[in-house]
Image (spheres, rainbow, N blue to C red):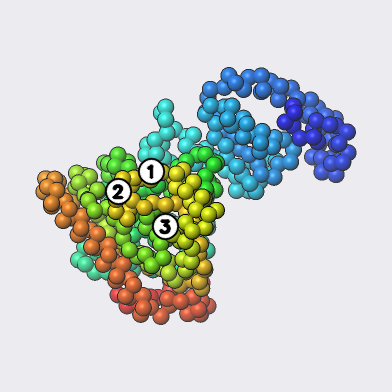
Amino acid sequence: WNNISPVFRQPELLPLHGVTLSRLFPKDTLLWKVELLKSAVTSANAHIYAVRAETLILLSGRDQWLLKEEDINRYSITLPKCIVRKLKDNGHFLFFEEGVDLVNIIKCTNLYRRGKSHDHLSDYIMPTRYELKKQLDDHKLLIDATSPVYLSTLEDGKIVRGFEGLPSEGPVLYVGYHMLLGLELGPMITQVLKERNIHLRGMAHPMLFINSEVTFVDTQMLDKYKILGGVPVSNFNIYKLLQAKSHVLLYPGGIREALHRKGEEYKLFWPEQQEFVRVASKFGAKIVPFGVVGEDDICKLVLDGDDQRNIPILKQFMEEATKQAGNLREGDETELGNQDCYLPGLLPKIPGRFYYYFGKPIETEGKEQELRDKEKAQEFYLQVKSEVEQCIAYLKMKREGDPYRHLLPRMMYQASHGFSSEIPTFDL
């Protein structure tokens, strides 16, 4: 009872809020609800220590009537398996407000499952039409601003615009370069799903799947990766996805590429030893190397991890975030082992353009025995890496000849041809 807002604890305060409450409840109904709340709180407090089941608490950031955030935090500690989801922009009538989807929240907090524990593979549910539309809407601004150019390679080596060159049947392993902050992910995954009905299951850093609210990023911002099929990166998960003939998206450079330093754009930070070749060959998966450029056309990195280490408050934040996220390459003495987590300081530019290039699929079927040899596997691995570097180099060269690389020419083209028209690019 002590946790209830003073509005309900002291009925004499009700007249002060009468203008609001009278629109919702008659006086007798409101007083009855207050007594009901007293009884409910007493009963809940008496039994809370007996609860052992998983619980989900939805905390409205603008709810001035019921429990405060401090009380919720206390309950989350008392309950042994409690997940708190903070909805900062929502009020008291949570489920009547636009944008609050309980099913979506249950899926994103890993509470939906078929077995004793959540399985990111077998328990995953494809996004609904509403969820896919929301993802497209969420990325619409970035897509409209950068007018992405997607290129793929047919079996005969011909480069075409679009995704025609992507294999229809799995298993397929897409291996490529991670732009700053993973800016390429949203447009790529949603467009491949929309145009080819190919669902890319991205291998993601495990920190994206932490349910705790005590993280250095808003957990709701990470929901999109779960909705679109992100899976915590591990050899086991890659194995299971390829075994299920899925289309798997892998970034060997991982967080080191996505949070690179100044002057490191378009540089690959891959492990020295092959990590995916043998598992791909075991299932005869096609490997599609790809490159993407454009980050330097929409922003300038002005404050990187090295800079932030020289600023005490940012250094502390970075060290705490890195500790919380964990280092997947701990013990790696190469630059790949430097996996600092930080929020880079960016200076926006007038948007340029994103360019994606999917190289010719590389076959592994029938090569399992051959690639068991370490030297052969390493040679194959370096071939894939070289293909990715060539894709990046091709795009960097060709974009120089794109008359629509910059925003103004694209706006003028759409003004005369319609805003839904496809904007041309360089000659292929």
Residue appearing at x 31%, y 60% in the figure: 268
Q: What residue is pinned by disc 1?
A: 232
Viewer-closest of 331 and 406: 331
User: Looking at the image, is mark 2 or mark 1 earlier in the sequence?
Assistant: 1
Residue appearing at x 75%, y 28% in the figure: 2
User: Looking at the image, is mark 3 or mark 2 earlier in the sequence?
Assistant: 3
Q: Quadrant of residue 242?
A: top left
Residue appearing at x 20%, y 55% in the figure: 381
Q: What residue is pinned by disc 3?
A: 259
Answer left or right for 75 relative to 205.
right
Tag in front: 3 or 2:
2
Q: Secondary structure at mark 3?
A: loop
User: Label 1 is placed on what type of residue?
Assistant: Pro
User: Label 3 is placed on what type of residue?
Assistant: Leu
Q: Secondary structure at mark 1?
A: strand
Rendered view: 334 above or below 3: below
Rendered view: 38 above or below 161: above
Q: Secondary structure at mark 2?
A: loop
Viewer-closest of 427 and 394: 394
Viewer-closest of 49 and 136: 49
Q: What residue is pinned by disc 2?
A: 332
